[in-house]
Image: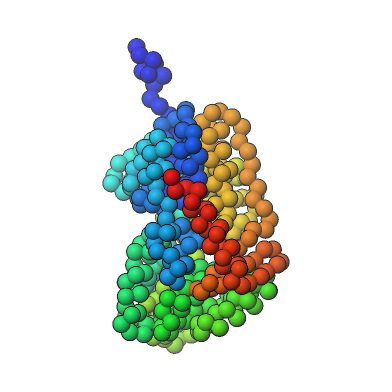
Amino acid sequence: MSTAAAKGPARQLLLLGAGHAHVQVLAQMAQAPWTGAQITLIAPYDRQLYSGMVPGFVAGHYALDDCVIPLQPLVQRSGIRWLQRSVSALDAQAQTVQLDDGSVLHYDWLSINTGPVQNRALIEQSLPGAREHALFIRPIEAFGALWPQVVQMGQSRALRIAVVGAGAAGMELAMAMRHCLPGAAITLLCGDVPLGAGYNAGVQAKLRAALLKRKITLLPDSAAGLRSGEILLASGASLACDVPVLTVGAQAPAWLQPSGLALDAQGFVAVDACQRSTSHAQVFAAGDVSSRVDRTLARSGVYAVRAGPALATNLAATLAGQLLLEHQPPQHTLNLISCGDHFAIASWGEHSAQGRWVWWLKDWIDRRFLARYRL
């Protein structure tokens, strides 16, 4: 019997998704390939579109290619296998993943970093007509491909654009759209949540002033349905609209619900301080698809990026049979909110600032982040 046969089949580590954290895992493997398992990346797109630079792309400051991390060089350098597929089912008990082509893969260890999704079926229930008429910002790759079509439309006539959802993404995109399409009528549907909820009072005031200065209409109402050329509002009124853009909060992937993994109340993977599933020790998760049970963290790209090195360390330790390390992100993180033009607002705990220098700082940080992973 050969040595390979005596050892049996190689153990399998599956990486689901190529989100911010997994890009850093790939980069670490590219520097020094891991041993101890056959590693397979499952990701449908050949590049990662970095969400932090999407508002700059929408505003016209960046070309789409400026905002992406090509996966092929990372995969080639890391020596792993890559399947350009999507996940359709996960069985944590059987330790199997089913792909969109019907194939089934077994794993010994699994890491999930698929990024945020907008569940169209779920959104359609609360917002009838969304599937047919709305421009979804997720998957972000599809949004990046469709936005130039909106720009082309806006060059021939003044568009009426409504951004549904007034979180950080909604505010950034509304101001980016104003910079790109100065003749458009842009409305931000704020609902009944305070503008900039989650930020300190100084940031909230700066955000409101920035939106109003850029002539973005702030409508304290919610969308109840979509029809061709209009949005039906919760108040009973309607809003004329050519392009409704949905920036409502991300949902968990639908395939997680029947997976058998422990989930939080919103359906995201419940993980401990080591980014490991609280119910299945061979499963890890990071970024927007997960929720820490030991502390509350915002669903933010900032935390997903910070989780990357810690996830890579613990996956490598798992393959080597070593102890895992807890990842404790800082209490406060630097949040930089772009305002469409070369101007941005900074938030750090109870402190805030704004100005052109903040935008240049954000631009430098974003470009430096991408440069690390462009081999």
Tally the numbered discs: 0
Q: Is residue 260 visible?
A: no
Using the image, determine if residue 149 lies above or below residue 83.
below
Using the image, determine if residue 55 lies above or below residue 231.
above
**Identity of the residue furthest to the left in this view:** 101
Q: Quadrant of the N terminus?
A: top left
Q: Residue at x 56, y 58 (%)?
A: 365
Q: Is residue 69 visible?
A: yes
- Horizontally, is 92 left or right of 148 in the view? right
Q: Residue at x 52, y 58 (%)?
A: 366
Residue 216, image x, y percentages: 50, 82
Q: Residue at x 59, y 59 (%)?
A: 298
**Identity of the residue furthest to the right in this view:** 350
Q: Residue at x 49, y 51 (%)?
A: 371
Q: Nearer the viewer, residue 72 or 245?
A: 72
**Identity of the residue furthest to the bottom in this view:** 237
Colour convention: rainbow
Q: Quadrant of residue 54?
A: bottom left
Q: Nearer the viewer, residue 163 or 341?
A: 341
Residue 98, image x, y percentages: 35, 44
Q: Quadrant of residue 80?
A: top left
Q: Quadrant of the C terminus?
A: top left
Residue 359, image x, y percentages: 56, 67
- Horizontally, is 357 left or right of 237 in the view? right
Q: Nearer the viewer, residue 197 or 143?
A: 143
